[in-house]
Image (cartoon, coloured by chain):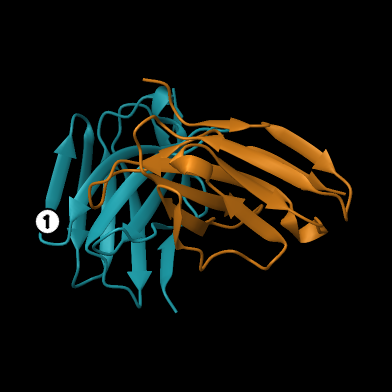
Chain colours: A orange, B cyan
Amino acid sequence: EAGVTQFPSHSVIEKGQTVTLRCDPISGHDNLYWYRRVMGKEIKFLLHFVKESKQDESGMPNNRFLAERTGGTYSTLKVQPAELEDSGVYFCASSAGREHSPLHFGNGTRLTVT
Amino acid sequence: SQKIEQNSEALNIQEGKTATLTCNYTNYSPAYLQWYRQDPGRGPVFLLLIRENEKEKRKERLKVTFDTTLKQSLFHITASQPADSATYLCALLSGGYQKVTFGIGTKLQVIP
């Protein structure tokens, strides 16, 4: 089966610009998560979709971040306008519908804001 | 606040020895604990899950223990190999479709 794919793998943008990250989960996985790792810190939860609905968005840093999951398939995470502290690696993960199902991660998008 | 502690210092061991990694947590009552492996430039990969009512879980050369009294999990790799070199992440989750909370990870280096 195809794994979780993320695009782009790297993005370098200037402060104030907009960037959109995309995640394609494993087919059939209703749960989709976004996580972020800032250099030197642990991987931190951003939000969780169940199908197209936001189940938990308590980890979203502020209203500059907007996540969508149209039709319950792929998801996008938009940062607008980007700030320097948004730099990091953004991971997407998906899981099947069972409780405590393991997360299947993509390889992440490395975002650098200059 | 909830806190997960892993030794963020790298652990170097000789090939063939047993590697033991520690995960401690505070202000948390997890129902499940997971361990993931992460290689440079890649996303974490799930290895093992252990429930709060389980003391120990094994999978091939891997063994995980979970002590809810000490609030600690130990992750062992026996007969370690250079290919085991990676960062290992401890992750906690409550029951239900809750978010998974990760530790910072411990980098393991197995020396031939």
* Identity of the residue drawn at 24% across and 58% down: B32
Residue at the front extreme of this rendering: A71
> Quick one: A113 or A52, which is closer to the camera?
A52
Look at the image and tell me in which quarter the N terminus of chain A lies. Answer: top left
Q: Quadrant of the rendered structure where residue B3 is? A: bottom left
Q: Vertically, is A112 above or below A55? A: above
Which residue does the numbered mark 1 point to in the structure image?
A: B55
* Identity of the residue drawn at 41% across and 41% down: A94
Picture coordinates of residue A16 (x, y %)? Answer: 88, 55
Picture coordinates of residue A98 (x, y %)? Answer: 23, 47
> Quick one: B63 or B38, which is closer to the camera?
B38
The amino acid type found where label 1 is placed reads Lys
Is residue A108 left or right of B36 when viewed as pictured?
right
Q: Is residue A51 visible?
A: yes
Picture coordinates of residue A51 (x, y %)? Answer: 40, 47
* Identity of the residue drawn at 59% across and 64% down: A60
Chain bearing tag 1 is: B
Name the element at disc 1.
loop
Mark 1 Cα shell of 10 Å, populated few (<14), some (14-19), many (≥20): few
Q: Vertically, is B63 above or below A46? A: above
Is residue A15 left or right of B102 when viewed as pictured?
right
Q: Vertically, is A34 above or below A60? A: above
Q: Is residue B7 visible?
A: no
Is residue B35 left or right of B41 when viewed as pictured?
left
Is residue A56 left or right of A36 when viewed as pictured?
left
